[in-house]
């Protein structure tokens, strides 16, 4: 059973409650005691919350969560175990830890090949159970996503003052380029398609498929699978790949992936490449961080959000016809859609029905568009798969 122990005491006395083997320490001095699991040690990052009811393994392996501690609002996390097929990016840092309400139980799922606790330990990620996740989520909604340290020690030995200072001294995600830390190191020819029950990941079918070069800023593997499903052949390249190297691959179109960190920081090297591709009228499709950098390249600007959007149930309105898509989201930055902020070359195509923030753009006079949400889901709804088909169809 959960034992909520969220404390907002500005000056913690350092005493560890009986049975506590884990702690979350916010930069303002607030302390949440709980039961640690997974890796032993401590990590610093930004605390966010995710409202999805499924897909915790995909969430924890999404590179977009680099340097973040995920609070799961759904209370039962880990109860279906883990397996090798639900990893979104193998060997790449994703979330550094997670906070959950209930203790993780033994897995009860026919696909499970291991426990969530052991998997976190092997991955070097810290888990913290027994936390009042509702109170923590309300705190994030009211005051914004805080910097924090998550720590696990089976003996319950914690230097709270030192952890508070570590949280306070961490610079935060604004101005931080994390794409460079999660991108792949070398070009890769992508071979897998979508997953099918009993078959695993299938292989591409057919010949004469248009060639897409996908720039990896911290991509989820399911994005590439969906590009293949939509009819493309995909070559994935590192984040700092030059225009000349991209053109050597003779792409019919270029895809800009999701990823972590501040788009303005990653844009220092990514935006000039995208601008040159726009000048050539190269077909471009961007998702999440890629969407934000496409906007920067076209003259718009980005901004840090108060709490961000993370979950699998976010309603988005398509402005063209008023259709509402239920989407999967994971972002703490957004394209600024305040009056005049988009500039003359950008058209807003989608908006969030939660807060009116930008969720899609098109570049005037170019074959380039992007969306803030994740049409590949994993986890989440599949309302927006048509965007992959739209992009591949534009490659002619």
Image (tube, rainbow, N blue to C red):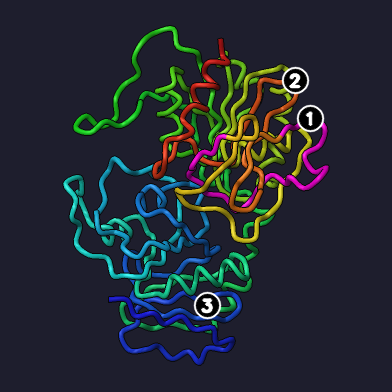
Q: Quadrant of the N terminus?
A: bottom left
Q: Nearer the viewer, residue 349 or 154?
A: 349
- Check residue 329 for magenta coloring: yes
Q: Secondary structure at mark 3?
A: helix
Which residues are drawn in magenta?
323-347
Residue 377 percent coordinates (x, y): 43, 40
Closer to the eye: label 1 or 3: 1
Left or right position of 376 against 10:
left
Answer with the quarter of the image where residue 108 lies. bottom left
Residue named by callout 3: 163
Residue named by callout 1: 345
Please give the name of the residue rendered at 28% of the width and 62% of the height, measured from the top-left corner: 117
Q: Earlier in the sequence, mark 2 or mark 1?
A: 1
Query: In the current view of this chain or complex, which residue is farthest to the front?
Result: 322
Q: Secondary structure at mark 2?
A: loop
Numbered tag placed on residue 258 in the rendering: none
Left or right position of 178 against 89:
right
Pointers 2 and 1 in contact (C-beta within 8 Å): yes
């Amino acid at each position: 059973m959960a034992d909520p122990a969220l404390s907002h005491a500005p000056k913690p006395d350092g005493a560890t409650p009986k049975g506590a083997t884990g702690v979350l320490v916010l930069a303002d001095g607030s302390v949440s005691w709980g039961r640690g699991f997974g890796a032993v040690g401590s990590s610093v990052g930004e605390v966010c919350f995710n409202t999805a009811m499924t897909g915790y393994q995909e969430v924890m392996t999404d590179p977009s969560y680099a340097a973040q501690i995920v609070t799961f609002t759904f209370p039962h996390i880990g109860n279906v175990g883990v397996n090798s097929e639900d990893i979104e990016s193998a060997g790449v840092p994703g979330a550094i830890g997670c906070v959950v309400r209930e203790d993780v139980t033994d897995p009860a799922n026919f696909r499970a090949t291991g426990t969530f606790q052991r998997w976190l330990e092997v991955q070097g990620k810290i888990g913290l159970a027994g936390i009042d996740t509702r109170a923590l989520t309300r705190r994030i909604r009211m005051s914004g996503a805080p910097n924090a340290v998550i720590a696990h020690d089976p003996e319950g030995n914690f230097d709270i003052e030192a952890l508070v200072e570590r949280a306070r001294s961490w610079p935060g995600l604004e101005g931080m380029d994390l794409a460079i830390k999660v991108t792949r190191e070398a070009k890769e020819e992508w071979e897998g398609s979508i997953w099918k029950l009993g078959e695993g990941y299938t292989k591409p079918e057919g010949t004469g498929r248009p060639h897409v070069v996908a720039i990896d800023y911290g991509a989820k593997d399911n994005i590439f699978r969906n590009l293949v499903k939509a009819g493309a052949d995909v070559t994935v390249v590192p984040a700092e790949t030059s225009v000349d190297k991209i053109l050597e691959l003779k792409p019919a179109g270029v895809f800009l992936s999701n990823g972590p960190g501040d788009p303005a920081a990653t844009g220092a090297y990514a935006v000039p490449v995208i601008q040159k591709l726009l000048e050539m009228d190269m077909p471009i499709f961007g998702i999440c961080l890629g969407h934000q950098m496409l906007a920067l390249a076209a003259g718009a600007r980005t901004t840090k959000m108060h709490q961000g959007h993370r979950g699998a149930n976010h309603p988005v309105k398509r402005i063209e016809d008023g259709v509402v898509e239920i989407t999967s989201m994971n972002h703490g930055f957004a394209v600024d859609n305040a009056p005049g902020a988009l500039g003359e070359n950008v058209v807003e195509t989608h908006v969030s029905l939660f807060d009116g923030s930008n969720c899609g753009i098109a570049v005037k006079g170019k074959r380039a568009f992007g969306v803030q949400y994740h049409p590949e889901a994993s986890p989440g709804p599949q309302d927006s798969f048509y965007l992959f088909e739209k992009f591949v169809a534009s490659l002619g």
